[in-house]
Image (cartoon, grey):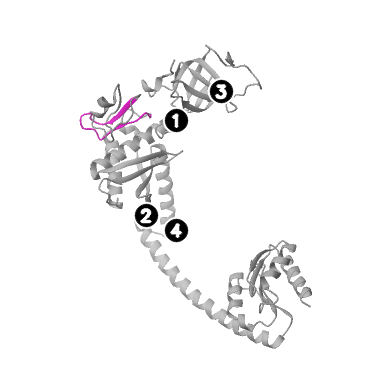
Amino acid sequence: MATEKLFQKDVYLKEADLKVCAVRENKGKIQVAFESTIFFPEGGGQPCDTGKAGGIAVTDVKDEKETGLVWHTVDIKAEEGADLANGIAPFEMGAVVRAELDWEKRFDHMQMHCGEHVLSGVFYNLFKVENHGFHMGEDYMTIDMAAEDGSPITEEMVRAAELACNKVIWENVPVTTVWFDTREEANSMPVRKQIKFDEDISVVFVGDKAAPIDCCACCGTHPSTTGQIGVVTIMKAESYKGMTRITLKAGRYAYLELAKRAKIASNLAQKYSCDVSLIEERIAAAEAKNDEIRRELGELKTAILKSEEEKLRAALAAEQKHFAVFRYSMQSADDLQTLARKAEDAFTSVAALYSEKDHSVVLASCGTPAAGQLVKDYAKMYGGKGGGTPKVARAIFSKAEDAELFMDLIEKHLR
């Protein structure tokens, strides 16, 4: 006997007494089927309900098409080898247990799924843009959209559809689910997509059934009016496999997102001492100023490196040591690697350019011995890592002491 889905009759039923009709173990987990259920099983892009049954957590709900049973995974364990033919406490065969939904989660799903219907409907009505795929995450949804004529979906279209969607919500129009016996009967309705299956056909109407804002086959749960969605906000629209993927939030999660963004905007307005409406302008001005500072800094850095290159070349020519160490307090390892490459032709033996701020050693060589091989052979002895070419290589250490020991070892190796 198939499980009766009580949520199809009353989507607001939050708790009920359910009679156990089957118990099984599946992949190490106990699953229970009841003669009827208030728990929506995963389907139609909507996650399943969770809650409690007999005081035990219901963690997953699946619809078994072959038998019509709805299986509820419960958070209990059976003893190894236990015979479940008569069930397991408190789910003995024929037992009646009290079931309670996680109502906040269910209502979140109702708001989100209905919000997706309304947005898909207005996109199609306004622009002949079709919904080609839907996914509901924990607190967001994605819809993959494409125009019938293949034209691009613009930012203006996205914002116009978002506003139209929220206007439908504010009008608080009815949301109705109707079941049909045949595909032909269902397809005689103004459905947004032709229905291609023949069993359990349910069609959701948003607004007037004769001229609905949306009309689409759907097995999910929805509120009775659009006003209960609250609000829909589109987070982003991006290119995806030749379509446009719309990421959106609805209901409670949309409110929380908008509240978070309002707080961020308020903080930015306070930081830039301006009204919220002027934040973008102030940030653009600040970025322009930062770009100028970065340009000046780049020019200064180039001049300093040029000066350091001249000093390094002079020192290398004067010292003629088998291994020389040059210490730098301000330059980073990246700076020293650039410096070593610029002065590459001046190295007649091996030298170490040491960045005190990064605890990094840049080894520079004429190629023999190979700088990269020296780093590979000895840096790991002191917890260092890195590598490079025969002429320039880098060794990175977490402590100055390790870098010093590494350089001391290289000096001794090259004597």
For the C terminus, the quadrant is: bottom right
The residue lying at 42 percent from left, 65 percent from top is 287
**Residue hosting label 2:** 276
C-alpha distance separating marks 4 and 2: 11 Å
The spot of residue 101 in percent (x, y) is 47, 25
Q: Give the range drawn in magenta.
A: 201-220
Residue type at mark 3 is: Ile
Quarter of the view holding residue 130: top left
For the N terminus, the quadrant is: top left
C-alpha distance separating marks 3 and 2: 49 Å
C-alpha distance separating marks 1 and 4: 46 Å
The residue lying at 67 percent from left, 84 percent from top is 316
The spot of residue 285 in percent (x, y) is 39, 66
**Residue hosting label 4:** 271
Observer-nearest residue: 403 or 374? 374
Mark 2 and mark 1 in contact? Answer it, CB < 8 Å: no
Mark positioned earlier in the residue sequence (3 or 4)? 3
Mark positioned earlier in the residue sequence (2 or 1)? 1
The residue lying at 69 percent from left, 69 percent from top is 373
3 vs 2, front mark:
3
**Residue hosting label 1:** 42
2 vs 1, front mark:
1
Label 3 element class? strand
Q: How crowded is mark 4: few (under 14 residues within 10 Å), some or many (20 or more)?
A: few
Quarter of the view holding residue 11: top left
Left or right of 278: which side holds 18? right
Mark 3 and mark 2 in contact? Answer it, CB < 8 Å: no
Mark positioned earlier in the residue sequence (1 or 3)? 1
